[in-house]
Image: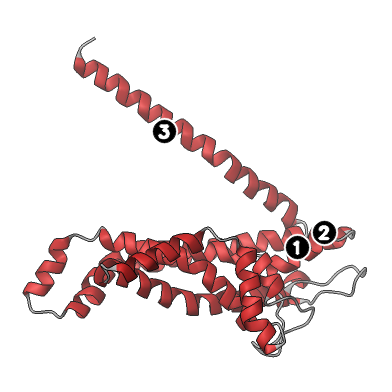
């Protein structure tokens, strides 16, 4: 067998192996999505999206307050975690080369491995105990802490992939260092950073343990961000372990709604990023 033929055979074999590995990886993902869709579709109705939970043991009701509560809590987490995470990633990649930058990088790696329930207990002791009540603010802060390591490390790695020639060209034209970082380097890496941010959002959107210690739950509409707030993950958990068939159906419907919300957020983010990239 000639070297050319051998290389071609190896190339085909590796390609086939990659395709098979991809199909194997897709099997559990498609299976979970199909099962959640099949189980959750039966519990969807207009009342589910507009009604409040019924009293214990009474059939019917919905999760309108939990859906809105999840959007509010995740929104608070994004407002806190995204700016801090991107700023820390920019510092570590562009401005920090000393011990403090190494400390930030190490802290992000360690925080990324901390169980989410530990973060919930930490925020509970820091916020809930001091304020003496659960709140959407506490829930958002807990989710923001969970988001931070993913955003910091993603921002750092993507900024390092930006060619040094872009920085040198901007600096050679007399552009200040901070403007080069924001308008050249950060803008170039923005699509990848946005993808990392959406991964962080998708992760925290389904977190339950931290919210049990912070936002807690509420069977009614929360009157303010300082009140206990219902969220989809906590509501799904509560309903799924109940002995009532109707609540279990609603739990599956809530799980499907949560998956669709995350999917819609990712699609919107990708569309916005693609339009901005094309407009350059």
- The circle on residue 250 is none
Question: Gap between marks 3 and 1, in whole Å?
Answer: 37 Å
The secondary structure type at the circle numbered 3 is: helix
Spatial CA span between label 1 and label 2: 6 Å
User: Quarter of the image containing the C terminus?
Assistant: bottom left
Q: As drawn, is 33 to the left or to the right of 220?
A: left
Residue position for label 1: 237
User: 121 or 13, which lies in front?
Assistant: 121
Q: Position of residue 92 (x, y in %)?
A: 31, 68
| Mark 1 residue crowding within 10 angstroms, few (<14) / some (14–19) / many (20+) | some
The Cα atoms of the two marked residues, 2 and 3, are separated by 40 Å
Q: Sequence order check: which comes first, mark 3 or mark 1? A: 3
Can see residue 53? yes
Toward the viewer: 275 or 64? 64
> Upstream in the sequence, badge 2 or badge 3?
3
Number of the front mark, 3 or 1: 1
Q: Is residue 13 above or below residue 80?
A: above
Marking on residue 18: 3
Q: Where is residue 9 in the image (x, y as percent from the top left)?
A: 31, 19
Q: Residues within 10 Å of mark 2 (few under 14, many from 20)?
A: few
Give me the residue at 61% from left, 83% from top: 137
The reply to whether the C-beta atoms of the residues labelled 2 and 3 are less than 8 Å apart is no
The label on residue 241 is: 2
């Amino acid at each position: 067998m000639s070297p050319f033929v051998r290389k071609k055979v190896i190339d085909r074999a590796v390609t086939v192996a990659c395709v098979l590995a991809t199909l194997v990886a897709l099997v559990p993902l498609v299976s979970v999505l199909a099962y959640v869709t099949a189980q959750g579709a039966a519990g969807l109705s207009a009342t589910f999206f507009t009604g409040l939970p019924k009293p214990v043991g009474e059939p019917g009701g919905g999760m309108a307050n939990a859906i809105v509560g999840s959007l509010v809590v995740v929104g608070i987490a994004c407002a806190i975690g995204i700016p801090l995470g991107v700023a820390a990633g920019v510092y570590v990649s562009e401005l920090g080369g000393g011990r403090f930058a190494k400390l930030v990088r190490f802290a992000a790696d360690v925080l990324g491995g901390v169980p989410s329930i530990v973060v919930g207990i930490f925020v509970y002791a820091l916020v809930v105990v001091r304020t003496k009540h659960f709140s959407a603010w506490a829930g958002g802060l807990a989710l923001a802490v969970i988001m931070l390591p993913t955003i910091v490390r993603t921002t750092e790695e993507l900024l390092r992939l930006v060619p040094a020639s872009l920085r040198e060209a901007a600096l050679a034209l007399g552009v200040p260092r901070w403007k080069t970082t924001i308008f050249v380097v950060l803008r170039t890496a923005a699509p990848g950073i946005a993808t990392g941010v959406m991964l962080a959002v998708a992760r925290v959107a389904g977190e339950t343990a931290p919210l049990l210690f912070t936002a807690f739950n509420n069977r009614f509409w929360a009157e303010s961000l300082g009140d206990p707030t219902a969220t989809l993950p906590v509501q799904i958990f509560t309903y799924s372990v109940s002995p009532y068939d109707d609540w279990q159906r609603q739990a599956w419907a809530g799980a499907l709604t949560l998956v669709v919300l995350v999917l819609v957020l990712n699609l919107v983010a990708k569309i916005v990023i693609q339009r901005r990239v094309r407009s350059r």
